[in-house]
Image (spheres, rainbow, N blue to C red):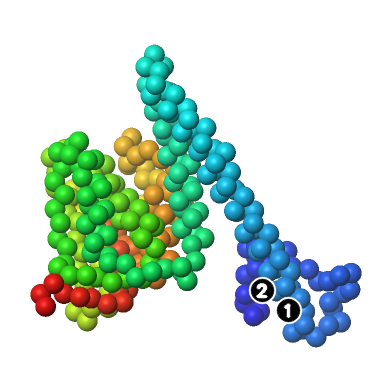
Amino acid sequence: MDFELEYLKQNLVALPTHAGGVSLDGYDKFDTRIAQVRIASQQLRFLQNDRKETLAFISHDLRAPLASALMALEQESRLSTRLHKSLSQALSLAEDFLQASRAEMIEVSSFNEIDFAGLVHQAVDDAYDAAILKSIVLQREIVEGIVWVRGNFGLLHRALLNLILNAVKYSPPDALVVISLQVNQDKTMATFSVIDHGPGIPFEEQARLFKRFSRIKSHEKIAEGAGLGLYFVRTVTEKHQGTIQVQSDLGQPTKFSMHLPMTGFLSHDY
């Protein structure tokens, strides 16, 4: 309890030494801790409500006018295409922030059983149009069978799609992107991976790759956005009790691997 209270003091709230006008100095130390935890809980509830209001603002007050402006631009050809691009980027940024916040707030108790293999196939299908535009081949190496994991379908789908679309974005035209899903020998862990042959990620920049608002310096001319895509992937992965890794270096292939615990496996060979 002392450790958790110290963390709250340093990172969240200024914990009081009195409650209701009465000093806590004369109280038993355990009673003092209880009172401080109660105050911290109240502030946590306040912060939670404040976050919900912020998300509501982004979802409606910010996204709605941006979407309306884009619709108006599509109907009015005389307006500048540069304005259309700027509005599209702003809408994309709002959406990225909203999705990252939703991933942070998702309750694990709401998770359901999901066929992870089927989800990977759907994510690859959804990235097909973007790959076609660059003549990129999406090669699937997906285990035959039903890979059961417990999670949130929408968040996992978006995380997988982010990784695949990143590989397409950073790959040169006519390249090969390999999407893989394999399970370990005892059928307890599923590993989803994406390999591309783009510019590579310098080893010294990989430590901050999954942090919020992180951007790779060598990719700044290619990348657009606020640097929330891989942070979102990491947040979703950790919410599903998994881990995310990257293997790369400048001028080398890049491989992202997501490891998720399985709840079951049904082979198609039965």
**Secondary structure state at the residue bearing disc 1:** helix
- Mark 1 is surrounded, within 10 Å at the Cα level, by few (under 14), some (14 to 19) or many (20 or more) other residues, namely some
**Along the horizontal axis of the image, is 214 left or right of 262?**
right
3D distance between C-alphas at marks 2 and 1: 8 Å
**Along the horizontal axis of the image, is 5 left or right of 169?**
right
* Furthest residue in direction right, as rendered: 21
Which residue is pictured at 23% across the width and 76% down the height? 265
Q: Which mark is residue 59?
A: none
Which residue is pictured at 29% across the width and 47% down the height? 166
Give the image location of residue 185, x and y in percent.
Answer: 19, 79
Give the image location of residue 241, x and y in percent.
Answer: 39, 71
**Secondary structure state at the residue bearing disc 2:** helix
**Along the horizontal axis of the image, is 68 left or right of 201?**
right
Dividing the picture into quadrants, the one containing residue 18 is bottom right
Q: Amino acid at mark 1?
A: Arg
Q: Amino acid at mark 2?
A: Leu
Mark 2 or mark 1, earlier in chain: 2
Does the CB distance between marks 2 and 1 fall below 8 Å? yes
Q: Note whether 151 is above or below 138 in the view shown.
A: below
Q: Which mark is residue 33?
A: 1
Dividing the picture into quadrants, the one containing residue 232 is bottom left
**Relative depth, front residue between 106 and 266:** 266
State the quadrant of the C terminus: bottom left
The answer to whether any part of residue 251 appears in the image is: no
Q: Which residue position is annotated with label 2? A: 5
Which residue is pictured at 84% across the width and 78% down the height? 25
